[in-house]
Every structure is written in structure tokens, then in C-alpha cells.
């Protein structure tokens, strides 16, 4: 029986500053910049003053010419403000992967992995308290120093680029939208950059209207440009035409950014499907298509006294194209929308007006496939699993743990395998919501829209820069429980940690030190997720709900 | 075709080819006045070691040793090959000599428990799923304690609100036994409905002595009893799968031990 305890200072939000080298002098210098000089400091609460944000949520980095600052495809949790110097953003085509110098993840070697057999503690949640004294926040950084492009003139010659100068902000799209970086950016000259982790960016946006407008404008402009550029239907357009489309496209956001609150309320009330925020209604006149940029939306049609989910839309999907195209082709103005569109949580949309499509797209476009008729013609009972997955928002999961209960003997080999790769502590519970013979277990789904990251005050929970897994930096986690409370699926657990002798760690007031724990998709272990490998009955799979039908028997 | 089904197919083909070759090789050796048991014996020993490695693979989940589902497939297929090869090696169902008979008994027990395990692996998941109540086996005592507490609260409330102790007396005389711990485990495992029959019998027996208000309370207790019945089912069926491993693995270790001694004896006295 454990009787002794070890006392340590309770970790606080700013216990681990983003940049350890940040000083009051640097903050004084930053406060002279026009973007900060005019801010009304009184609008910031005493708990998060402007100077505190600059001191703890930002860091100044100097990049040398050719040095890559962000890479296209990486996940990052911070935005950048250029203090002085110039950068280049690579627009088209993207830089090749080898040129970007992608780093391999620091995975355990075979022996190191095997050594867990004898190094795992039999005591639960053991930590070495010393490591918390030397914690670094770099794990949640969005920047990446040290990779240089070799022949910049050739790159400028072969790739379309744009220059970024002082006081320009970039990276806010990935930081706020929880999406991968859309372009690579490198230093053109020696450049000083203020890197702002997204928690600080959120506070600046919340308490200062100038910053809010600046961030939102940049966010909307970049989002719009990138989305249109990547959409297959606009691929054939030249820059001028694309610009014309861009000018007439509207940017819309529906639903709440922190949608998990209403989702949890829905579950607490025992409802399977939230009504959601209506975006378009069946029977409406089709005045344009809606293209999903981020988030999810439900396409439904009325059936009896309810709404039948026909499909759901994610990033890049388009709503309303079939009807508008038919209306244009047949010159029939009586054609109306055959389905309704509802925001599942929050959704960022681009509304592209009908006139734009008729002018630039339809004349050269292949007729869209008649998918809606096919979906509406399917047997009602065949939709049950889809309705369940959409209603429960499992469509958010990119690596959800799906268990076929008709194969699972409940042997818990998966749980033991997880524990054996995580210091003796399992990082999921083989329990969860079930439908028919399927269970989505309480294991982190590494969501496309990880709302757990919204409130984290230290950035401890972040996307892995390598594979996009949502992981917790144990060293910087202060155990506030915000992520656990935010997770719509109850997949994050707070655990009380102990020192190497198994004595509980407590703070000065004798309150336990807690840490957030969750599935990390075995990102540091060789061989991928141990749970899936360990299942002797082929019952457990990690699935992407946005990919091929995860319930399909033959899918493997 | 699922990847695991493909693995089964490949393993069956390999095992079939190996068996045909070993039978042919034994026949040729016998024709040349050789001792075919040497090859079949060592092959058998190798197969048994391979089958035993499956358990070690489960302990080594932290390193990539292939998916356990493939190991299960290989375990089932090559386990069958081992059984077939055992008869080729011994040439009989019942070998002579006490030691060999002991080895044979243990081998048969391991084989039978293996076949039983394979059958349970196919049957148990569906039975648990169709039970419609997912519960973690280790949490069953806690769940039953909570149900018992709810039942006792209902009984107390019934006595208080109806000013009658009939239900309370019946609960303490009869139903308390049922709510104390998992019941009718053997019946549940073999698919009988003793639990439901018990609930029906006991609730019918007391209903005639209760008024409408008391019957309302009895209905609540009956609903809890049915939930517990499903928990008992999960406990029995899931528990059997766990207990099975406690037979199969130690028996397999016993066979391996006897097999090693058997090889030593053969080398000392016969070769």
C-alpha cells in the first residue's frame, strides 16, 4: 500500500513558455511594432494580459535565406508574423518531398521497443518528476528550423511563388482550422519572425478587433484561394478566370466552432441525431453550389415525418451541382434542390454563384453523375449504419477503433497490447457505443476536426507533424482536463501520476497531479497500432470513417 | 476476400503439401528399411514449438511480429497438421508404454481443448453480441452490486410507501439469493434459459399476494432481474473463454515438457 507522496509545483498554463528565450526586453520591442502598438491592453483580462501572451505564447525566430519555415502538408499549431525581412510562399507546383527534407519520426528501435517487456512499471501511471522540470514546448511547435533549399533562383524559376513582407501573417489557416499547411514557405532574405502558438492567436483574436479582422481576412482569403485552386472543376481555368470566380465566391461558416458542447448535450438527452444548423432546404431554388472547405455537413431528404441521411460531405465535396447543372442544361427554371444540407457541428463553405458556373464551368464540364437518385433509391434499412455514424459524428474519425463484435471474443488482447506499448498503461477502453454488431471503442479517433485542441492552454495536445495523429505532450500537459471535457467521444482520460516509486505526485496543497492520456496511435512504436496487430480474431480495425465504407465486410 | 481468409487458404495449402510430403517420405523410408519416425518426430516437435510460440507472440505485442490474426490462422491450420502427423508418427491412436500413453493423453487433451477453443472463438462473439448488452468482464461484480443496490432501494421504498412487508420478505427469502452474485452460469453457457425461467417463476409466485402498487414495484425489480440475467449470461460465456485458456496453455506446456523428455529417451535408448 502506498502511503508516501511526493510534492511538486502544480503546472500552470504559462509554466512552459513557448519560447524559453523570450524576455521582457523582447516583449518591449514587440510592443513597438505597429500591429501591437495600437492594441488596447485594457481589453485583455488580468489572467491573460497582452504582454503575458507575447511573453509566453510567442517566440522570435531568425531564419536564414533558403531556410524552410513551414512545409506544405505538415500539421502545425502556430501562425507567423514577419517582423522584418522577406519570405516566399510556393504556390504552384509544390516543392518535391525530398527538397522539403521531411524528417523521419523518432520511432523506437526494435530493441528499445522490446525492452518495454522489462522496463514497463507494474505500477500505474509512473513518471519521472524530474522531466517536468526540463519540459520543452517544442513538441507543439509549428515551425521547423534547419532545412534549407539549395538553389533558390531555380526554384523561383520553376515554381510560381509570392513574396511575403513585414507585418504579414501566415500559417493562421492551419493553426486555427486544425488542417494541414497548404503551402511551403521559405526565407528569401534573413528574416525575423514572431511565431504565435494558436492559444495566443486565439486570445489576440478574441480581445482585439483589429487582430480579429486581420486574422479573419487572411484566413478567408487564403482559404478561398486554396480551395478553389484545388477543386477539380476549376482546374482548367487560367489565373484571370480563377480570380473572377474568387471575387464572386462567398465564404460562409455555419454551426459553432466548438460544436462539441451541443453534441454532448444531445447525447446527455439521449438523442441520436442533432438537428444541426440548416444551410439549404429541399425545394429551394438552386442559386449556386456549396463547396465544403472544412467540417462536415449532412445531405438529407424528407422521408415520412423525418429526414433521411443520404450522404455526408467533407472537405472538397460539393452540394447542389446535380440540380444546377440539370437546370442549366435543360433550361428548366423549375428544378429545385432535391435535398437539404445541414451543418454537422461547424462547417466552412464556399458558395459559388450559379452565374459563375454557367460562365466558366458548365460549358466544358462533363455531366455530373446522378448520385442522389441512387442514394435515395437504396433500401431504408441499409442506411441504418450510416445514419448512426453520421448522427454520432463518427465521420469525424480518421483512425477510429471499430470492433466487429461478431468476431471479438472479448479476450482483451488489444488492451494488453496497448498497455505493453505504453509503459504498462492502456490508452483506451474496450467499451463504447454499439450498433448492430459494431462497436466504436473509446479510443482516440484522431479526428479530422479535433475539438479537443480548442481549449488546451499550453498546446500540450497537438497534431503530430509527421502523420497528423493527435497526441499529448505529457511534459507540458497541466492536467486541466479541458481536452477531456471537450472530446465529444469521451476518449481522453485524466490520470493521477506517480513517481518512480509509485508514490502519488501532489502539489503544495496536496491535490493530485493529473495528466491527460489517450491513444497516440503508437506513433513512436515500430509496426503501427499494437491493438490492431494484437487482435487474434481480425475483429479490431482502425478505420477512416471518411474513406471506403468501414463497415463493409470485405474491406481490409 | 479478407486478408485473413487468404492467409488461411495459403496455410491450408502449405499444410496439405507438407502432410503429403511427410507421408510419402515416411513410406519411402519404410520401404528402404529406415526409421520414418525420426523425420515425423522432429517435424512434430518443430510444429509443437511453433504452436507454443503463439502465446509468446501475445506477450511481445510491442514489436512487429505479424498480425495476431495470421498467427491464429497458422495456429489453427498447423495445429490440425500436428494432430494428423501425430498419427503418422505413432502409427496408432493408442501407443504402447505408460510414458507414451501419458504423452498421448496430454496431446489429445490439448488437441480437444484447441478444437473446443476454435469452436468457442466462432460461437462466443455472436452469442455475446446477440445478448445486446456489452459489459467488461472484470466489471461484472461491480455492475451486479449496483443492480442489487437498486433492487434493495426499490424493496425499501415499497415497504415504506405501501405499508406492507410482503415484497420485502419475499426479496430477503428468495430474490436476494439471485441478486447476490452471477447465477445459472452453466445453463447460460449451454444456451438454456434457467435464469429467465427462475425470474418468471418467482415473480409469478409472489404476484398473487400483492396489490397494484406493490406489483408496480415488483415490475421494477423484475426489469432489474432481467438486466442481471443478461449480465450473468455475458459473465458465463465470456468467462468460459477466459477459463478455457487456463486449460489449454498449461496442458500445452505439459506436452512440450513430456515431448522433450521423450526425445531424450529416444536418443538414449533407441538410436
Image (tube, rainbow, N blue to C red):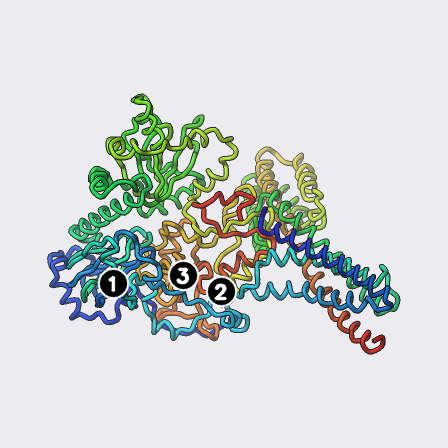
Q: Secondary structure at mark 1?
A: loop
Instruction: Please rate how many residues cluster around mark 2, counting C-alpha atoms within 10 Å: few if below 14, some from 14 to 19, many from 20.
Output: some
Q: Which residue is mark 1?
A: A57
Q: Which mark is residue A302?
A: none
Element carrying mark 3? strand
The structure residue drawn at horizontal position 30% and vertical position 66%, both measured from the top left corner, is A147
Q: Marks 3 and 2: which is nearer the front?
A: 2
Circle 3 residues within 10 Å: few <14, some 14–19, many ≥20 = many
* Tag 3 residue: A516
Is residue B256 visible in this depiction of the protein?
A: yes
Q: Nearer the viewer, residue B206 or A481?
A: A481
Disc on the earlier residue, 1 or 3: 1
Estimate the x, y position of residue B116 in percent, counting from the top left.
72, 53
Tell if the residue under mark 1 belongs to the same chain as the one under mark 3.
yes
Q: Do discs 3 and 2 share a chain?
A: yes
- Report the side of B14 relative to A199 (left or right): right
Amino acid at each position: 500500500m502506498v502511503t508516501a507522496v511526493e510534492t511538486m509545483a502544480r503546472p500552470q498554463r504559462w509554466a512552459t513558455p513557448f519560447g524559453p528565450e523570450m524576455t521582457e526586453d523582447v516583449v518591449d520591442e514587440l510592443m513597438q511594432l505597429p500591429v501591437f502598438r495600437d492594441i488596447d491592453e485594457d481589453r485583455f483580462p488580468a489572467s491573460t494580459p497582452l504582454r503575458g501572451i507575447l511573453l509566453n505564447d510567442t517566440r522570435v525566430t531568425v531564419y536564414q535565406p533558403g531556410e524552410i519555415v513551414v512545409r506544405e502538408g505538415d500539421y502545425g499549431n502556430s501562425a507567423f508574423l514577419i517582423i522584418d525581412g522577406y519570405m516566399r510562399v510556393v504556390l504552384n507546383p509544390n516543392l518535391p518531398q525530398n527538397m522539403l527534407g521531411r524528417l523521419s519520426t523518432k520511432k523506437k528501435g526494435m530493441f528499445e521497443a522490446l525492452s518495454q517487456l522489462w522496463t514497463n512499471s507494474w505500477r500505474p501511471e509512473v513518471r519521472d518528476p524530474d522531466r517536468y522540470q526540463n519540459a520543452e514546448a517544442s513538441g507543439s511547435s509549428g515551425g521547423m528550423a534547419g532545412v534549407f533549399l539549395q538553389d533558390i533562383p531555380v526554384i523561383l524559376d520553376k515554381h510560381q511563388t509570392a513574396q511575403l513582407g513585414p507585418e504579414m501573417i501566415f500559417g493562421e489557416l492551419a493553426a486555427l482550422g486544425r488542417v494541414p499547411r497548404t503551402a511551403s514557405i521559405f526565407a528569401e532574405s534573413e528574416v525575423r519572425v514572431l511565431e504565435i502558438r494558436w492559444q495566443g492567436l486565439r486570445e489576440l483574436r478574441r480581445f482585439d478587433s483589429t487582430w480579429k479582422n486581420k486574422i479573419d481576412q487572411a484566413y478567408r482569403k487564403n482559404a478561398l484561394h486554396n480551395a478553389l485552386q484545388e477543386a477539380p472543376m476549376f482546374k482548367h481555368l487560367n489565373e484571370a478566370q480563377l480570380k473572377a470566380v474568387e471575387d464572386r465566391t462567398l465564404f460562409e461558416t455555419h454551426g459553432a466552432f466548438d460544436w462539441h458542447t451541443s453534441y454532448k448535450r444531445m447525447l446527455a438527452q439521449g438523442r441520436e441525431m442533432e438537428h444541426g444548423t440548416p444551410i439549404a432546404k429541399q425545394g429551394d431554388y438552386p442559386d449556386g453550389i456549396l463547396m465544403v472547405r472544412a467540417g462536415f455537413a449532412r445531405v438529407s431528404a424528407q422521408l415520412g415525418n423525418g429526414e433521411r441521411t443520404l450522404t455526408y460531405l467533407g472537405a472538397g465535396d460539393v452540394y447542389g451541382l446535380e440540380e444546377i447543372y440539370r437546370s442549366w442544361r435543360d433550361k428548366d427554371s423549375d428544378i429545385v434542390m432535391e435535398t437539404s444540407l445541414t451543418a454537422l457541428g461547424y462547417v466552412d463553405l464556399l458558395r459559388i454563384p450559379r452565374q459563375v458556373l454557367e460562365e466558366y464551368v458548365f460549358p466544358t464540364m462533363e455531366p455530373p453523375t446522378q448520385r442522389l437518385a441512387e442514394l435515395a433509391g437504396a433500401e431504408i434499412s441499409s442506411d441504418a449504419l450510416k445514419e448512426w455514424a453520421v448522427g454520432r459524428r463518427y465521420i469525424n474519425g480518421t483512425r477510429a477503433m471499430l470492433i466487429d463484435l461478431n468476431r471479438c471474443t472479448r479476450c482483451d488482447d488489444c488492451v494488453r497490447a496497448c498497455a505493453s506499448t505504453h509503459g504498462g498503461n492502456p490508452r483506451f477502453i474496450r467499451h463504447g457505443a454499439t450498433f448492430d454488431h459494431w462497436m466504436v471503442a473509446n479510443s482516440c479517433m484522431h479526428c479530422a476536426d479535433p475539438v479537443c485542441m480548442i481549449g488546451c492552454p499550453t498546446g500540450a495536445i497537438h497534431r503530430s507533424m509527421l502523420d497528423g495523429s493527435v497526441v499529448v505532450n505529457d511534459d507540458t500537459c497541466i492536467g486541466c482536463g479541458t481536452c477531456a471535457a471537450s472530446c465529444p467521444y469521451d476518449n481522453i482520460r485524466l490520470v493521477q501520476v506517480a513517481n518512480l516509486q509509485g508514490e502519488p505526485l501532489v502539489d503544495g496543497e496536496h491535490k493530485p497531479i493529473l495528466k491527460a492520456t489517450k491513444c497516440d496511435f503508437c506513433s513512436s512504436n515500430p509496426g503501427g497500432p499494437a491493438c490492431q496487430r494484437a487482435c487474434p480474431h481480425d475483429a479490431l480495425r482502425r478505420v477512416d470513417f471518411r474513406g471506403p465504407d468501414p463497415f463493409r465486410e470485405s474491406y481490409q | 476476400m479478407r486478408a485473413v481468409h487468404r492467409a488461411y487458404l495459403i496455410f491450408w495449402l502449405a499444410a496439405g503439401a507438407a502432410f503429403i510430403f511427410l507421408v510419402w517420405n515416411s513410406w519411402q523410408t519404410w520401404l528402404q528399411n529406415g526409421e520414418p519416425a525420426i523425420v515425423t518426430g522432429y517435424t512434430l516437435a518443430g510444429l509443437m514449438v511453433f504452436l507454443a510460440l503463439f502465446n509468446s507472440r501475445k506477450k511481445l505485442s510491442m514489436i512487429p511480429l505479424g498480425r495476431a490474426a495470421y498467427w491464429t490462422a497458422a495456429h489453427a491450420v498447423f495445429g490440425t497438421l500436428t494432430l494428423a502427423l501425430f498419427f503418422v508418427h505413432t502409427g496408432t491412436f493408442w501407443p504402447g508404454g505408460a510414458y507414451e500413453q501419458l504423452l498421448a493423453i496430454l496431446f489429445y487433451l490439448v488437441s480437444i481443448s484447441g478444437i473446443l477453443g476454435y469452436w468457442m472463438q466462432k460461437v462466443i462473439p455472436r452469442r455475446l453480441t446477440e445478448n445486446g448488452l456489452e459489459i467488461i468482464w472484470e466489471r461484472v461484480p461491480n455492475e451486479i452490486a449496483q443492480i442489487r443496490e437498486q433492487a434493495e432501494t426499490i424493496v425499501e421504498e415499497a415497504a415504506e410507501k405501501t405499508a406492507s412487508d410482503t415484497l420485502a420478505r419475499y426479496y430477503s427469502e428468495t430474490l436476494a439469493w439471485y441478486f447476490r452474485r452471477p447465477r445459472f452460469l452453466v445453463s447460460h453457457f449451454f444456451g438454456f434459459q434457467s435464469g429467465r425461467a427462475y425470474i418468471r417463476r418467482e415473480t409469478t409466485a409472489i404476484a398473487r399476494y400483492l396489490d397494484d402498487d406493490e406489483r408496480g414495484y415488483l415490475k421494477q425489480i423484475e426489469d432489474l432481474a432481467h438486466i442481471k440475467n443478461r449480465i450473468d449470461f455475458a459473465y458465463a460465456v465470456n468467462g468460459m473463454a477466459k477459463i478455457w485458456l487456463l486449460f489449454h496453455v498449461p496442458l500445452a506446456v505439459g506436452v512440450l515438457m513430456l515431448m522433450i523428455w521423450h526425445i531424450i529417451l529416444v536418443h538414449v535408448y533407441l538410436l
